[in-house]
Image (cartoon, rainbow, N blue to C red):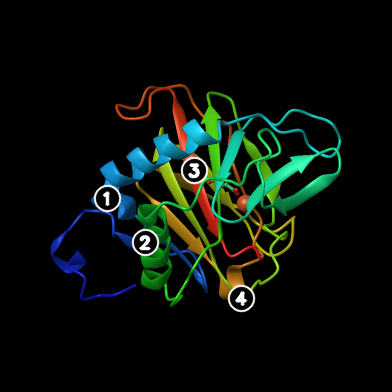
Amino acid sequence: MHASSGELFDTGAEPRERSLGEGAALLRSFALAHEREILDALDGVIRAAPLRHMLTPGGLRMSVAMSNCGALGWISDRRGYRYAARDPESGKPWPQLPAAFARLAHDAASQAGFADFAPDACLINRYEAGAKLSLHQDRDEKDFSQPIVSVSLGLPAMFLFGGLRRNDRVSRIPLAHGDVVVWGGASRMRYHGVAPLKDGTHPRLGACRVNLTFRKAG
Ligand code: SIN
Ligand code: FE2
């Protein structure tokens, strides 16, 4: 947290940057400066690689609909969780990582203390009312020295941020359109998830929340 960032004068306002522990930070509204480019790029990606409900290895349909862009995309099916260079639905490579996405991920990581973040994977998660993501660790990547950058768009959600063990205490962090959470370093393997999404309508995204999760996967 930087005491010089103007918060001193915003009495009563929520700080724009909040530490969530060593290596973890919440950057409020960080994505809003480039909202239009990001939403336009998102439209392009999901036109080329439509959102779909993947199956868990156990054969259950995930409540969150997913797609990817970047050199690698995270997928789940009967064979397990993994990264793949091609969209299994189309057989084509995932859409390129849009420049606006790469810049946002890089700049957010850098603001949180991780220089030179160059993600090769962006998982797109779409939550409709009732959709949720159970507590999990991001552990399918090769290099845990790189952080996770997670961008919230659309409806608000309750982010669940735990510790390094599944049973550690979980903080509940409300996330709004444009908020970015970064976790790496000592926090890289922290458990996290999303509580069931509440009903609502967002002026830009309608009845859903979209999350972009940037990773260095390969
Ligand atoms: C994830 O863990 O992949 C997504 C988290 C979120 O939607 O905020
Ligand atoms: Fe995750």
Q: Nearer the viewer, residue 159 or 33?
A: 33
> What separation in Å lies between label 4 and label 2 (alpha carbons)?
19 Å
Q: Which label's residue is closer to the chain start, 2 or 3?
A: 2
- Amino acid type for the residue under numbered disc 4: Ser
Residue marked by disc 2: 103
Query: What is the x, y in percent for residue 64?
Result: 61, 33
Kindly identify which numbered label has been placed on residue 145: 4
Q: Which label's residue is closer to the chain start, 3 or 1?
A: 1
Q: Residue at x 85, y 38 (%)?
A: 78
- Label 2, secondary structure: give it: helix
* Residue 118 shown left or right of residue 80 in the figure: left
Crowd class of label 4 (few under 14; some 14 to 19; many from 20; radius 10 Å): few
Label 4 C-beta lies within 8 Å of the nearest ligand 2 atom: no
Label 2 C-beta lies within 8 Å of the nearest ligand 1 atom: no
Residue marked by disc 1: 34
Q: Residue at x 67, y 57 (%)?
A: 138
Label tally: 4
Q: Which label's residue is closer to the chain start, 4 or 2?
A: 2
Q: Which label's residue is closer to the chain start, 1 or 2?
A: 1
Classify residue 105 by image quadrant.
bottom left
For the N terminus, give its image quadrant.
Answer: bottom left
Any part of residue 177 in sight: no
- Amino acid type for the residue under numbered disc 3: Asn
Q: Nearer the viewer, mark 3 or mark 1?
A: 1
Question: Disc 1 vs disc 2: Cβ atoms closer than 8 Å?
Answer: yes
Kindly identify which numbered label has been placed on residue 3: none
Q: Which label's residue is closer to the chain start, 3 or 4?
A: 4
Query: What is the x, y in percent for residue 18?
Result: 38, 63
- Label 1, secondary structure: give it: helix
- Amino acid type for the residue under numbered disc 2: Arg
Query: What is the x, y in percent for residue 66?
Result: 60, 37
Kindly identify which numbered label has been placed on residue 211: 3
